[in-house]
Image (cartoon, rainbow, N blue to C red):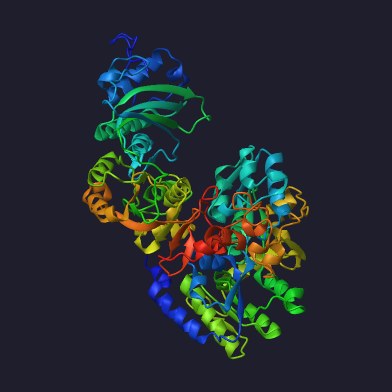
Amino acid sequence: MSLASPVKKGYVRPLDLKHGRVDMGHGAGGRAMAQLISELFAAAFANEHLDRGDDVAVLPAPAPGDRLVVATDAHVVSPLFFPGGDIGCLSVHGTVNDLAVMGARPLYLAASFILEEGFPLAELARIVQSMAHASREAGVPVVTGDTKVVEQGKGDGVFITTTGVGALPAGREIGGANARPGDAILVSGTLGDHGMAIMAQRESLAFDSEIASDTAALHGLVAAMLEAVPTIRVLRDPTRGGLATTLNEIATQSGVGMDLDEAAIPVHPQVAAACELLGLDPLYVANEGKLIAICAAEDAERLLATMRAHPLGQRAARIGTVTADPNAFVQIRTAFGGRRMVDWLSGEQLPRIC
Amino acid sequence: MKYVDEFRDGALAAKLAEAIAREADPGRRYAFMEFCGGHTHAISRYGVTDLLPANVRMIHGPGCPVCVLPIGRIDMAIRLALARPDVTICTYGDCLRVPASDGLSLLKAKARGADIRMVYSAADALALAQKMPDREVVFFAIGFETTTPPTALVLRQAQALGHANFSVLCNHVLTPSAILTILESPEVRELGTVPLDGFIGPAHVSTIIGSRPYAFFAEEYRKPVVIAGFEPLDVMQAIRMLIRQVNEGRAEVENEFTRAVTPDGNLKAQAIVSEVFEPRRSFEWRGLREVPYSALRIRGPFAAWDAEAKFGLEFVSVPDNRACECGAILRGVKTPTDCKLFGTVCTPENPMGSCMVSSEGACAAHYNYGRFRDVPVVAGMTR
């Protein structure tokens, strides 16, 4: 992303961020692209690394002993704007959270934009501003990036890929393979808010709801949790596929089973109602600001208290226990009193017909 | 959640379970078929089986419209969508994954370029046709009596408004004929290899057709029928009512779902349905083969909106995988684990037979919710 505009100020009309639209020129590498970058992206994300205007960001090495952690995530959400957020802040939170749940300190982001010809510049500006705000709030700057434009019909408005770099302190080993029988399973709050907020916005589903996405950067919460219980075994953000799929991943990685208590799993009443209407299970609906934590049983209460003391963990709950089960089955005791499996999601969760 | 949580109350369930255990005669076995996939789903989803005595067995019937849809009918939609780029096929979400011929499904045909869209209602499909006057919008309609009235309504609307670019590929099927087929099957009627002591009748279907159509089964076949809602407490209450009838030697139609079902049902909906549809002489069901007078087709005055007539679509019967036991499972002759394909070749990701297709099918329900019971160590796990 070259920032130095070849356009002499005063001789060119500024980008029309109110009525303009993305055109092929904005991705062609010439003057229009330079203008888009300098007047929109560079202005919004301004920081010492990006401001140098080179094609790469030159970054200081992490502290001695720290390991580098890299995560990348493509964001293709539709609709682009939804209650509680938009694709911009989501693209920051998603990648920051991928780093955070490894116990890493997120340091920098790289962002790549694929824009569709004809996309309104006003909407792009809204997205970029939201992304810049999320990045500043998280303290994780966007230090390099790229922009491409595809012909109309070949994109979905805006696709954003973000890559994050973080530092992992020596000795910290958090991972999906670390769960042990007897461990406690905790979640940081209500499940399914993000997925249901998005679904409620789709044009074919005209139901009124106050459900807002939970999109948020979780590294602050994780830092507090690790301070209270440095030996947390597993952290994971249950995004696509929801809690159910994430727990199945962890169970498989660790070669253990899980035993959940349905009555203890927090779900916002409106999310539960919307899921009921559509025949969906909130355990499979996506989240963007929640995490799962697995720790030794004796640390569970301390960890839970720490989570609840943090704004992003107020509705944290202990939802189950890790069991010895070579089949890696995730089971749940239903609030009704029976028992069943919580299996991997097969394909996409589709509404039932009646 | 108001009006829902009340029917999922664990404490009430425990009391009801005690009552059932008290009333069930330890000296005999009870086998009840829940006809409807909604009940199968509720039983698996809430672990109702855990709350029943060992001598009360639930048999999962063929009442999942997605599961009983034959391959050949989906092929019709896929062939049309792939051959005619100007056609958009709309259907309910859970139809999209049903396996068809050539390794295809509607979802896979979409990936090959066919315009296939998920809708939440028949009205959404008609609205799409209004929005895209240059395209032919075909609503792939499926379902039992519950989803038939909305399809009838949009057909009437399409005719009234003159929407020539809209049509319906009708796959609506009828509950009573399917129940009759099961009762007439040799395993139940002659051989007695499938003991069937009674039915839990479908809730939503009965809101339309009422409870009266089941009186015939109760009388003719001496089988008690209890119509029940889809909440787990409804199901348990229905089981208790069935046990009582069996114990007392009664075979009647009882209505547990009085909050929505009356003896005559919704007469207005029935009138619209008979105005727009007429019975087909025969219709193939997946797993049950040809069943006489078991489905509906669009009547002559609406022929212009009948996709089969409009596009000259021919049904070609396609046999299921030979090793697939779905037919026997749907009739209660076998259980999912009796099938060699279950959980090996046939999984929810790659369903071979009808029972694995939607989450309401007997095999999918057991695979997704209950297969831990097949592994003794895990099933016996305590907290």
**Is the residue B126 above or below the residue A142 in the image?**
below
- Tell which residue pokes out farthest to the bottom in this image: B248
- Is A198 in front, or is A161? A161
The quadrant in which residue A174 appears is top left
User: In front: A137, or B77?
Assistant: A137
- In the figure, A75 relative to B241: above or below? above
- Residue B280 visible in the displayed image: no
Q: Residue at x 71, y 57 (%)?
A: B70
Position of residue B18 in the picture relative to residue A290 (left or right): right
**In the rendered picture of this protein, how many numbered marks are placed on residues?**
0
Question: For this rendering, which residue is in front, A312 or A9?
Answer: A312
Instruction: State the image coordinates of residue B370 (x, y, percent, origin top left).
Output: 54, 62
Q: Is residue B339 left or right of residue B382?
A: right
Would residue A201 be visible to someone looking at this image? yes
The quadrant in which residue A110 appears is top left
Direction left: furthest residue: A309
- In the drawing, does residue B189 fall left or right of residue B147? right
The image quadrant where one finds the C terminus of chain B is bottom left
Rendering coords of residue B180 (x, y %): 71, 74
Residue B230 x, y percent position in the rendering:
51, 69
- A183 and A84: which one is in front? A183
Quadrant of the image containing the N terminus of chain B = bottom left
Residue B178 is drawn in which quadrant? Answer: bottom right
Residue A41's place in the image compared with B291, above or below, is above
In this rendering, would A281 be left or right of A137?
Answer: right
Q: Which residue is at a point 46% across and 59% down the rendered structure image?
A: A331
Give x and y (percent) for residue A114. Answer: 45, 27
In the displayed structure, A323 sits above or below B165; it is below
Q: Residue at x 61, y 60 (%)?
A: B363
